[in-house]
Each structure stands twice: as C-alpha cells, then as structure tokens.
Amino acid sequence: MKDIFVINGSASSHSSNQKLIDIFADLTKDIFNLSVFNELKLLPHFDPELSVTEPPKAIVDFRQSIEDADGILICTPEYVFSIPSGLKNAIEWCVSTTVFSEKPLGIITASANGEKGHLELQLIMETLMAHFTADTKLLIPGIKGKINDEGILMDTQSKKALINFIHAYEKLVL
C-alpha cells in the first residue's frame, strides 16, 4: 500500500472537506495508507529568514511528512476566492525546498464555488513542480448540499467524479 499525506486546507473542525477526506479514506482503504494533517492553524507564520536556516520543528516535521509520502492529497475549500491562509502559509514554508518536486499530487477543491481557489492552488503547485494531471484535480462546487450530516456523499455526479479522480490518482501514485 502507498503512503499518502493528506493536507486538509479547512480551518473548521466540522468541515465538508474533512467529510470528503473520510469518504476518500473509506473508498481507498485497500489502496492507500492515509496520514491526515489537520494542523494548519498550529503552524507558525511563514518567516523567510527562518525557512532555510532554522525552520521550526513543526515545519521540519511537516516537510518530512511530505518528503516521506508516496503521494500528496490536498483537499481544501476556497476562502474569499482564494486558498485558505493556513494552507498558503504551509506551502510557503516549503518553497525553499524541493519536497513537492515531482511528488504525485491530487487536488480536491470542495467549496461553495471554489473555481478561483482551485485554479490558484494549481498554479502554486505547478510552480513548486508537483506532479498532477487534469484527472487528478477535482472541483466540487456546492459541497455542503452534497454531503449529508452522516458524511455520505449524496450527489451521484460528484460521487462518480470522485471515483474517477481516485482511479486517476491511483495510477499517478503507482
């Protein structure tokens, strides 16, 4: 089984993105061993002077988790037509490294709309040379109306898109 480091871009403890990560985990339990990172709000603010010379332990550990993983999955909402600040902060800590270079990446943006944040995250990850394809990025607009309180993805079109995403991501990682 491949080790996947999942970054939850949401700052909410009851987010639709966490529910989506749980669904992804259930659908891939025979393929992937997931390690989910829900601690973005605990990371220190980016400091370019420390990034190279003396990164904080939390950042060293975060980078190491990315480095050690066979693949990365970022599942995030869009906040104010952009990626959440906590996710941007975590990524900025990685700019001076090569941890994302050629690393297989899946991007899921699940939000009210999500289009602009989805495009922004793709541009950022292209800049960091992460490896993803058209089929390993997924936009799910209107997510709150598509997942019920029990965490079940009720929308059949979104469920089909997620299954197709999983198949493409599996090929990318393997």
Image (cartoon, rainbow, N blue to C red):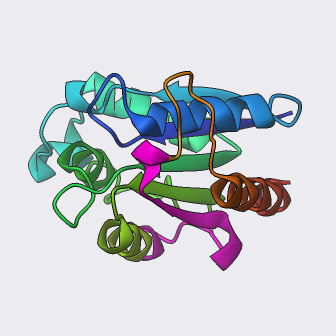
Residue drawn at point x = 39 percent, y = 77 percent: 123
Spot occupied by residue 90 in the image (x, y as percentages of width and height)? 29, 45
> Quadrant location of residue 83?
bottom left
- Total marks placed: 0
Q: Toward the viewer: 37 or 22? A: 22
Q: Toward the viewer: 103 or 147? A: 147
> Quadrant location of residue 56?
top left
Residue 7 among those drawn in magenta: no
Spot occupied by residue 171 in the image (x, y as percentages of width and height)? 85, 61
Q: Is residue 172 above or below residue 58?
A: below
Residue drawn at point x = 31 percent, y = 58 percent: 96
Q: Is residue 157 above or below residue 42?
A: below
Q: Toward the viewer: 136 or 113? A: 113
Quarter of the picture holding the C terminus? bottom right
Q: Is residue 137 left or right of residue 95?
A: right
Q: Is residue 19 left or right of residue 174?
A: left
Point out the stretch of residues depicted in magenta.
Answer: 124-145
Residue drawn at point x = 33 percent, y = 22 percent: 13
Spot occupied by residue 49 in the image (x, y as percentages of width and height)? 10, 49
Residue drawn at point x = 57 percent, y = 35 percent: 21
> Quadrant location of residue 25?
top right
Quarter of the picture holding the N terminus? top right
Q: Toward the viewer: 126 or 19? A: 19
